[in-house]
Image: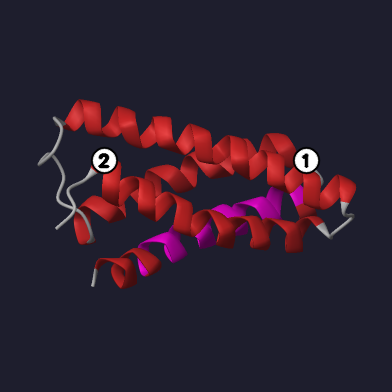
């Protein structure tokens, strides 16, 4: 089942994202929005690589170059949601930055899977 495989792929990317975020934002004190931007980009690359290796068939619906472009385009929208939700949870609701990051990452898992499955890769 693809969603189970994607759960592990997404989980690995989330560990990369959250792990680097904790190191640079929480422990080293860098600006959390800037750190969130870069760790999310790195995690998107990890997610794409593992997704085409274990979950989705690459190049079946779109040529490779367009597929990668679409993945990063979708990731840009996800990044916007990521940073917006992170800001709201931390600045307005006053949640701990680490806890807020975990919540946001969990919420965006389902969004990212659905977009990739139904719009970028095939629906088999």
* Crowd around label 1: few <14 · some 14–19 · many ≥20 (10 Å): some
Q: Is residue 75 left or right of residue 23?
A: left
What whole-number distance in Å separates the C-alpha atoms at marks 2 and 1?
34 Å
Q: Residue at x 82, y 46 (%)?
A: 29
Report the residue that reaches farthest toward the left. Answer: 60
| Above/below status of 92 relative to 64 | below
The quarter of the picture where the N terminus appears is: bottom left
Quadrant of res 75 = top left
The quarter of the picture where the C terminus appears is: bottom left
Q: Would you say the residues marked 2 and 1 are in contact, meaning their CB atoms lie under 8 Å apart?
A: no
Residue 15: horizontal and vertical position, in percent? Answer: 53, 62
Which residue is denoted by mark 2 in the rendering?
Answer: 120
Q: Residue at x 51, y 34 (%)?
A: 77
Q: Residue at x 49, y 32 (%)?
A: 76
Observer-side mark, 2 or 1, equals 2
Looking at the image, which is closer to me, 122 or 4?
122
Q: Is residue 30 left or right of residue 5?
A: right
- Write the start and end of the magenta stretch as one range: 8-25
């Amino acid at each position: 089942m693809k969603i189970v495989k994607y759960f592990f792929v997404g989980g690995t990317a989330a560990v990369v994202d959250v792990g680097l975020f904790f190191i640079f934002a929480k422990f080293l004190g860098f600006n959390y929005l800037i750190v969130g931007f870069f760790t999310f980009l790195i995690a998107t690359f990890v997610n794409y690589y593992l997704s085409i290796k274990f979950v989705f068939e690459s190049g079946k619906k779109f040529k490779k170059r367009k597929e990668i472009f679409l993945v990063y385009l979708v990731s840009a929208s996800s990044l916007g949601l990521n940073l917006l939700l992170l800001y709201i949870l931390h600045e307005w609701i006053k949640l701990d930055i680490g806890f807020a990051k975990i919540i946001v990452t969990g919420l965006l898992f389902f969004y990212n899977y659905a977009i990739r499955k139904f719009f970028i890769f095939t629906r088999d």
